């Protein structure tokens, strides 16, 4: 496939422009903010590159859409997609980044940061024994490139790591992978981490059925907000099935000021930062993908639009 | 050497008694709280086992003293020691434990836990990009078994790790080891970790000379409190050479209520918990050491009383 005209938009289009103009020749680019993208641009372009569709968005003249993020639900979820248009996504160091994010909150819990912080405020010297990584069992939902990289990091640190995926297919670095219909060892999990994409099959997959099986578990969501039923999570926090929730993604982003999560002491919020794409990584992945497309090579980061990821 | 009569004391003497009585036969034990230890007990005993000398303490009839901790400054620092008495110390998973302690505070900083906690209280959604382990430079003072285990962990996680020791001798897992009189790359260190024991040579080794070379560095002390000049650390915090201090050990423990560290937001305090000896590990190391002594084998955990560690 030959790509000549490319629209690049989204929050970091200017940084991408600075880097890309040094790296690539022989292509026509339009670097635009999301609100500047017109029907004319979309009629002109062979390719559209961004984190999500622009307010005016139309597939009909495009050959290729490339997502700067790993998640493509903004393009696919509850939308029609013309399968003749190739959809690719950015794969870079997301797994390593999310792994360190998760590890930081696991260690915060094991090393009692919050308790010691509170004791310091009260000027109380009270030794509490930390817990250690090798004693911990973690269940990771999603065994794709991101889930696998987290599992690799945690296995290196001698944690016991199980996976859950649609198929339950065996993957490296997981002691065992369960199908979503199976029975992973939820009752003994110290930590449950969600890395699932948002698709028709994963909407509200974290509901009372999963949460009721947990016991004082720390739940970390680095996948997509709408894979979790917020009502079920709040109930699980109130009942103690979930001891603390660490949430980087939400059904609605930015989180509205009235959302009860802001108030809860048993919820940690971060503003969707566990796997930010850097402009450098975004450009590298974009150029690699473009080269593969034009040279007819296998595209590992091609999205299966039927599955939704 | 033959050991028959053993006094076991210190804060966990009862847990040790429960485990030890199942494990060992043919020895005479007295399990006592520290205040119960009398001159009579010390005259009867071949061996004294504890974290530190009891209030009544006397070497003259002892053949062997074994420390339940890794640090032996309570036995040696500013005290006389009769070199005919063997001194050994506990070596177990301290390095791994302290490594996870340090890693937890490194990741807290890189993942901006405190900033996000503050933003949550203000209900502000403000993405800040985390930093990552592979970008970090760490200097570890002390390259013994503990320092080396921390270096092993950090190297596995792709951090750049330098060491500082009295001799500057090369050690595994350190990119380079500098002698204490040398010039480690302090100006580029993101984190400086102290694991040094307290001896005549290390008292107040962290003074203005080291701190003035730092720039917005996180300083973590898991060695001994008196290796740091508190006045110099406070000055370094005030001047910004040290951005934040994470202190697990202090010149005076428990820390007095009037100590200014309690008040400072740029100081994290934990009550000497980064390497607690578990009763199980204490007993294992004690029995191994006893067997080596009685069978004339090499004792790796023998303390060089002249060096003080």
Image (cartoon, coloured by chain):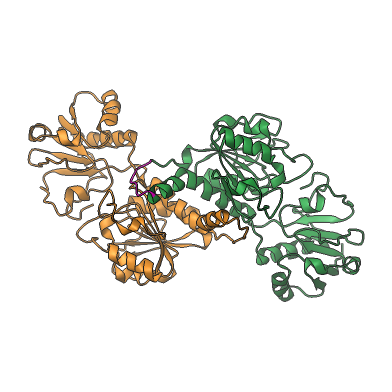
Chain colours: A green, B orange
Query: How many numbered callouts?
Result: 0
Magenta region: which residues? A122-128
Is B291 situated above or below B113? Answer: above
Q: Quadrant of residue A191?
A: top right
- Quadrant in which the N terminus of chain A appears: bottom right
Quadrant of residue A288 in the image? Answer: bottom right
Left/right of residue A14 with respect to residue B267 in the rendered view: right
Residue A280 picture location, percent across and down? 66, 67
Residue B195 sits in quarter: bottom left
| Residue for point 19% across, 31% down | B32
Instruction: Residue B1: tell me if it is visible.
Output: no
Q: Residue at x 70, y 74 (%)?
A: A18
Left or right relative to A180: residue B50: left
Answer with left or right where residue A30 lies relative to residue A220: right
Foreground residue among A302 and A191: A191
Viewer-side residue, B257 vs B271: B257
Which residue reaches farthest front? A258
**Image coords of residue A71 (percent x, y):** 73, 52
Q: Is residue A54 magenta?
A: no
Q: Is residue A305 above or below residue A63?
A: above
Image position, residue A56 (x, y; %): 86, 62
Residue A156 shows in this picture = yes
Q: Position of residue A183 (x, y in %)?
A: 65, 29
The kind of secondary structure the magenta stretch mainly shows is loop
Residue under the image location 34 percent in, 53 percent down: B222
């Amino acid at each position: 496939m030959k790509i000549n005209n490319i629209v690049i938009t989204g929050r970091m289009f200017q940084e991408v422009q600075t880097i890309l103009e040094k790296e690539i020749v022989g292509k026509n680019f339009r670097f635009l903010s999301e609100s500047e993208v017109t029907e004319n641009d979309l009629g002109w372009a062979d390719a559209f590159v961004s984190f999500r569709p622009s307010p005016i968005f139309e597939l009909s003249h495009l050959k290729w859409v490339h997502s700067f993020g790993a998640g493509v639900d903004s393009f696919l979820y509850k939308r029609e997609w013309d399968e003749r248009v190739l959809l690719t996504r950015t794969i870079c160091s997301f797994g390593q980044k999310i792994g360190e994010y998760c590890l930081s909150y696991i260690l915060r819990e094991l090393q009692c940061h919050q308790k010691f912080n509170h004791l310091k405020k009260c000027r109380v010297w009270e030794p509490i024994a930390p817990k250690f990584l090798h004693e911990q069992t973690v269940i990771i939902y999603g065994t794709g490139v991101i889930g696998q990289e987290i599992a690799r990091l945690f296995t290196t640190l001698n944690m016991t790591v199980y996976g859950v995926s649609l198929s339950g297919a065996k993957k490296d670095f997981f002691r065992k992978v369960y199908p979503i219909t199976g029975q992973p060892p939820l009752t003994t999990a110290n930590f449950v981490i969600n890395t699932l994409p948002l698709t028709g099959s994963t909407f509200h997959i974290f509901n009372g059925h999963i949460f009721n099986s947990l016991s004082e578990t720390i739940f970390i969501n680095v996948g997509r907000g709408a894979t979790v039923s917020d009502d079920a999570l709040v109930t699980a926090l109130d009942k103690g099935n979930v001891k603390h929730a660490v949430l980087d993604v939400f059904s609605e982003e930015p989180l509205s000021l009235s959302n009860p999560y802001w108030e809860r002491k048993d919820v940690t919020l971060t503003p969707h930062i566990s796997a930010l794409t850097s402009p450098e990584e975004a450009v590298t992945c974009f150029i690699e993908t473009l080269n593969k497309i034009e040279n007819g090579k296998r595209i590992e980061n091609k999205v299966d639009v039927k599955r939704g990821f």
